[in-house]
Image (cartoon, grey):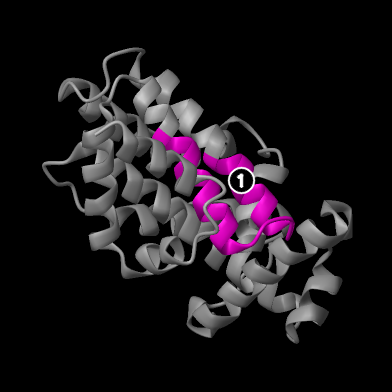
Amino acid sequence: MVNVSPRTADPAVRTALIEAAASLVVREGSDRLTLRRLASDVGTSTMAIYTHFGGMEQLRRAVRREAFGRLAAHLDDVDRTRDPVADVLMLGWAYYTNAADNPDLYRAMFMEQPIDAEDAVVGLDTFERLVDGVDRCLQAGRFTTGDATTLATQLWAAEHGVVSLLLAAIVSKVEAVDTILGTVVNLFQAYGDQPKAVARSLAAARRRSPDLDALLAASPGAGLGFALRRTREQR
């Protein structure tokens, strides 16, 4: 390991190296991630990589931690309210927003295998936040079937699938959000929530996020539009 004074470490360079590493892994594969290639892409020296990370393994660990750290930051912005279903919807919106804002880091989180057991547990707390949110829905009687971990896994899998389609440019942002929420609305009702209650929670979530509301206002109606029309018919 090369020892360099931390006073020479520029945080902006560290961030650029992490983002460039994620981009290289996503676009060309982890075998193309070399110190020389990364330094060239960022416009710095290989010494800078040693300065910030100590070596390639530490850099790969840093990419994973940065990716989950950004996801956690988005989830931290979600307030806990008296409407647990609306809160779960907002956690989903935070997950979507993070993926849209950090597509390469998002891909790196789920494309690259952890280096070891220590690396594998990084980011598990982000999933636990969804489990906790679903558990609150169960405790409040909004959801009446299943256990929190199972239901949270189903919700995560549904959103992750659509987000993957978005990042592959197969669906647009509007179509992605429409489809995610259409699926989630149907799942909420399958979990035992009542259509009117789901509609109220969705309205509350839209009030909490002008960006979400704007996307849904432009919805083509393929996913969420159908679910909401059915919900209104059941009122």
**Magenta-colored span:** 159-185
Q: Is residue 222 left or right of residue 123?
A: right
In reply to whether residue 162 is colored magenta, the answer given is: yes
144 or 96, nearer to the observer: 144
Q: Residue furthest front?
A: 233
Task: Determine whether 224 is above or below 188 in the image.
Answer: below
Q: Which residue is mark 1?
A: 162
**Type of amino acid at the residue the image marks with label 1:** Val
Asked if 60 appears above or below 146 in the picture, the reply is below
Say which residue appears at 41% left-offset and 47% top-offset: 92
Identified at 58% across, 34% down, the residue is 120
Do we see residue 10 in this rendering? Answer: no
- Residue at 68%, 39% in the rendered image: 115
The image quadrant that residue 160 belongs to is top right
Q: In what quadrant of the picture does the N terminus appear?
A: bottom right
Q: Horizontal and vertical percent for residue 114?
A: 66, 38
Image coordinates of residue 39 in percent, x first then y, are: 77, 77
Per the picture, the main secondary structure of the magenta-coloured stretch is helix
